[in-house]
Amino acid sequence: MRLAVVLAVFACTKSLAAPSASCAACHSEIYSPWKLSSMANSSGRIGTQRPAESFEKARFAHAGGGEYQVARSDGGYSMTFTQPPGVEGTRLLSWFVGSGRVGRSYLFSTDSFLFQAPVSYYSTGARWSVSPGFQRLRPVDLSRGVEPSCLRCHASGIRAIAGTQNQYEETPFTEAGVSCERCHGPGDTHIERMTARNPRAAQSPGIVQPAMLDPQRRDSVCAQCHLTGGARVARLNAKPYQAGQVLWDSVAVYVWSNAEAGAVAVTSHVERMEHSRCGKASGGKLWCASCHDPHGDPEAEKRPAHFRGRCQACHAAASCTETAAARAAASDDCTVCHMPKQPVFDSEHAVYTDHSIPRRPRNGSGERGTLLPFRGLEFAQRDRALALSTIAMTEPSARREAFELLRAAEAGNPADAAIAGQLAQFYDRLNAPAQALPLYERVVKMDPANTAAAVNLGTILIGKGDAERAMSLWRAALDRNPGLVSARMNLAVALLKTGDWENAKSQLDKVLIYDPGNATARELLAQANR
């Protein structure tokens, strides 16, 4: 088993200081349109969202051989799956992620652990298909755990169970969607000062107003979710980001040097706009709210005029050099030519707005270039080592530099668990268990919640004959995330070798909960039942 380390830092409060409804009494003119916006409806319990999905195209096949059917059901949507020969089952989808403008993904719970469904709804074409990232996985994969970092850009007040990867309270978040506090910071001080008519309130309202911040802090508010770059790395000993702070103090962000010419990604808005001619010419004045009102979306029929007005704040109407025929065809919609919808490389069946603001549409097939720190910021070499490590699997050219930087960083700070874990995985891939073993040992001691290190350490130990410790590590990892199929298969095989048939069969039965088509598990289970 080889698991990549995902590194990101966000504010992680179990509850909200002031839920968004607290803002409605004084800010109804903002709260009412926000409540209907994409931001406010980016997650929630199924049945509470708008717009509703269509079920006319709700049956589809996976390229690997499975088939899915989605239908309305009590308490959510039911997802039925079949896979030859004889594999079938149903899961209740309880939660959605995504506003529905482009599409939605769905979550289901198994024993209070949250998993991503392999089915998604795509608004273009009003159809259901395979979720992003599942296209090349096994036909029926029910094992992808939903970690808090996956939820925080879509929901607020994540209610994760400490010490686990993907276990949550019955309701996994305090507030659906992007709450007021995500952009304005904790609101309790503001409410106290304003309701008490504190004389200080006018000079110090106790709330973050993004438009009033300096460009670094202002842009950080949007970039916390809309700047993915090529890699994001949690900086060493950094505090979680909170609105009003500088994001890069918490997270080292690396972007591709040719970001504006490469393929569009789902959340590449900030870096593409940063590289655009408009972004460069504005001297830092152009930012997300120059065009977007975060408190509400323009009605569909008013969108062309809305964005044309934003463009004409800087560009005279007569300055467009496109032909009259092209302008007429676009119905004076500037975005048709200059911010066209493009397919994204990290999601099929979806298109997103190209924020590089090209003079003429591009095909997005250009080279991405090299990985550089965002805005030329200075980050530590350990941050670059981790950034390169995250892209090394798909970018072979990054592997040598990543490996050398990891070795140097580990020698300089052996207590850096993130560095030690990534270096151990490099040694693992180089088939050098003697070098990987002490690194994994150190990571597990420093960070018991690191299931990747625990599972990989167990694999090395079983090869050295230490089955007891290996099984202990795998059990601990499965307590944190029961969907780790490889770890559970390893545990089942080890139990079979010790003659513990009953516990082995129990583990194999659980494998089939998360990977119903696992042929090896089915074969071993059949042998154990003879």
Image (cartoon, rainbow, N blue to C red):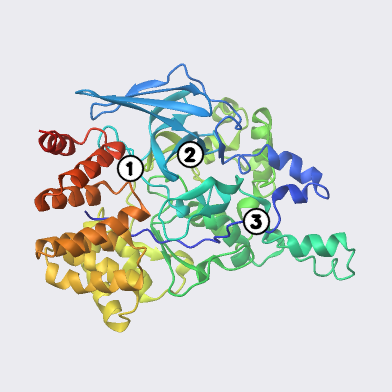
Mark toward the viewer: 3 or 2: 3
Q: Is residue 75 above or below residue 315?
A: above
Q: Is residue 113 left or right of residue 422?
A: right
Q: In this view, does 343 lie to the left or right of 309?
A: left
The residue labelled by disc 2 is: 352
Q: What residue type is labelled 3?
A: Leu
Foreground residue among 155 and 524: 524
Q: Label 1 crowding class (10 Å Cα cut-off): few <14, some 14-19, many 20+? A: many
The residue labelled by disc 1 is: 143
Mark-to-mark CA distance, 3 and 1 = 30 Å
Closer to the N terminus: mark 2 or mark 1?
A: 1
Mark-to-mark CA distance, 2 and 1 = 28 Å
Foreground residue among 400 and 321: 400
Residue at image location 58% in from the left, 55% down from the top: 222
Q: Where is residue 351 in the image (x, y as percent from the top left)?
A: 45, 35
The disc label shown at residue 52, or none: none
Q: Position of residue 214 (x, y in %)?
A: 65, 67
The residue labelled by disc 3 is: 16
Q: Which amino acid does label 2 sit on?
A: Tyr
Residue at image location 13% in from the left, 67% down from the top: 433
Mark-to-mark CA distance, 3 and 2 = 31 Å
